[in-house]
Amino acid sequence: MGKRLLVAYGLWALGGPLGLHHIYLGRDSHALLWMLTLGGFGAGWLWDFWHLPGWVAAANGAGAAEDRGGTVPELSTLRLAGQVAVGMYFGLVAALGLPWVPALVAQPLAVGLGVQLVSSVGDQTTEAPSILAAAFLASLLFQSRVLAVLPVSVAASVAAQRHRRYKLRGVPRPRLPARLYHLGLACLAFAAPLACRGLCGAAGLLSTLLTLPRAAVELLLLPLRLGRLLAEALGISGGSPLRDRGSGFGASGWSQRQLRAYEV
């Protein structure tokens, strides 16, 4: 069934940041990238407006007979910049959402997956093992620090560009339900660690909020307790000093009467 440009533009306008127009055109890698970055951080969604006619023509079979076997795609600085940016984005998400996973494992793996995703957009792809090898090697060199996500992403992107190639033609495409299922699993795998970290943070915030009323009551009672301690220190309260003083006066008065009786 042929793809219509008007439908593609409608999906671009309604759900472009979620990649609905890419799903319609069979560009699942591009759709997944847009889902995880909300339309390429907004800029990619606007950039799609000018390329929709060419993508619709390609989806309808324009240029399908062209033989590109053995040829290497031209170097694209835009794709290279996207690989570096998305690789860094995936690395930071892994650092935030997977703090219990060793950084030597989580960071290069996430960066490599992000670079691989950008590399597989459109009619191009690359070798995933080469990307992961470059990412893990760069991560070892920089000791997996948070700021090391930039050189790790650059190394993985350079490896992806060195092994870039065109996708094989004639590969049967899965049906739409299977494609949506795979896209949903990928989004769930990306969002689950962040959701878990967010729930843990929300639980900690809730426990802190529950302790605020008790802390407020303790703060309000603090002046009263300080006044009571000060009064006890000065002997104003308690009554024992007055009783002791009164008994002393009584004893001194009884001694004077005894003295007068003795003189008489």
Image: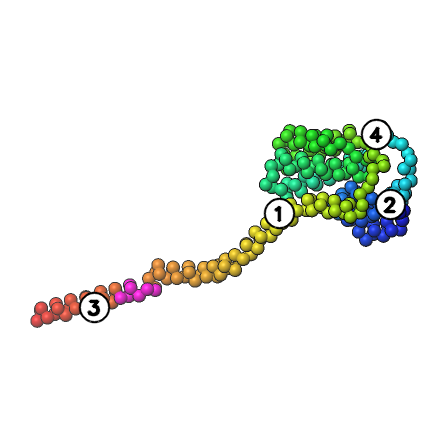
Disc 3 or 2, which lies upstream in sequence? 2
Label 3: which residue? 250
Quarter of the rendering containing residue 51: top right
User: Mark 1 Cα within 10 Å, few/some/many (few <14, many 20+)?
Assistant: some
Viewer-closest of 191 and 223: 191
Residue carrying label 4: 72
Identified at 84% across, 32% down, the residue is: 73
Does 204 sit left or right of 115 as displayed? left
**Magenta residue check for 103:** no
Left or right of 61 in this view: 98: left
Residue under pointer 2: 52
Label 4 vs 2, first from the N-terminus: 2
**Disc 4 vs disc 3: Cβ atoms closer than 8 Å?**
no
Distance from Cα at disc 1 to Cα at disc 4: 42 Å
Foreground label between 3 and 2: 2
Instruction: For marks 1 and 3, give the one nearer the viewer.
Output: 1
Q: Residue at x 25, y 67 (%)?
A: 246
Q: Circle 1 is placed at which residue position?
A: 197
Residue 26 is labelled as none
> The residue under label 2 is which amino acid type?
Leu
